Image (cartoon, rainbow, N blue to C red):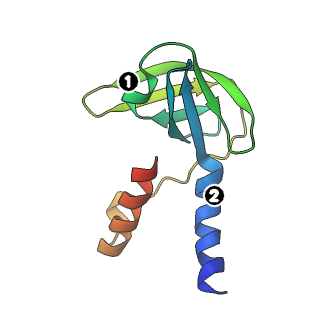
């Protein structure tokens, strides 16, 4: 397998698990499908306001409910009425090596 093919195999699941989050007409940000039952994690500053919608990588759009938020950590949990979504695989932070940590931080910065 070439380096390009290896990279594509890593990135594709991330692409499917990343969503676009919109709040009214004001703006948008991104989030990640945390659980296949519709739990989505995004930044708290993204969901300031009402009328939150989420667009999946396949183009489907859902209204979202803010289930929780932590402004100090800049995190928010959203819920959409959907199941069998492509949730991201959560890693074990105890198993990350130094080089992997840099890669993980770069990926999370894109969220």
Please tell me which residue is depicted at 50% across the width and 21% down the height of the picture: 26
Q: Is residue 82 visible?
A: no
Please tell me which residue is depicted at 51% across the width and 39% down the height of the picture: 31
Q: In the image, is residue 2 above or below residue 58? A: below
Task: Characterize the local packing of mark 2: few (<14), some (14-19) or many (20 or more) Cα atoms within 10 angstroms.
Answer: some
Q: Residue 84 vs residue 11: left or right?
A: right
Q: Residue 5 vs residue 79: left or right?
A: right
Q: How many marks?
A: 2
Q: Is residue 94 visible?
A: yes
Report how far apart the C-alphas of labels 1 and 2 lie in the structure: 26 Å
The kind of secondary structure element at disc 2 is helix
Quadrant placement of the N terminus? bottom right
Q: Pointers 1 and 2 in contact (CB under 8 A)?
A: no
Q: Earlier in the sequence, mark 1 or mark 2?
A: 2
In this view, the residue farthest toward the top is 50
**Which residue occupies the foreground of this view, 98 or 59?**
59
The kind of secondary structure element at disc 1 is strand
Residue 66's x, y, as percent?
49, 19
In this view, the residue farthest toward the bottom is 2
Quarter of the image where one finds residue 7 = bottom right
Give the residue number, with chain letter if any, for mark 1: 69
Give the residue number, with chain letter if any, for mark 2: 13
Residue 10's x, y, as percent?
58, 67
Q: Residue 85 vs residue 32: left or right?
A: right
Residue 49's x, y, as percent?
45, 14
Q: In the image, is residue 102 above or below residue 77? A: below
């Amino acid at each position: 397998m070439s380096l390009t093919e290896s990279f594509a195999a890593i990135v594709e699941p991330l692409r499917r698990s990343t969503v676009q989050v919109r709040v009214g007409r004001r703006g948008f940000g991104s989030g990640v499908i945390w659980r296949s039952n519709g739990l989505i994690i995004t930044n708290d500053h993204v969901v300031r306001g009402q009328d939150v919608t989420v667009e999946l990588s396949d183009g489907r759009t859902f209204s979202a409910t803010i289930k929780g938020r932590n402004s100090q950590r800049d995190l928010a949990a959203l819920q959409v009425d959907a199941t069998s979504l492509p949730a991201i695989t959560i890693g074990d932070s105890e198993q990350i090596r130094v080089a992997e940590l840099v890669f993980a931080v770069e990926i999370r910065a894109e969220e």
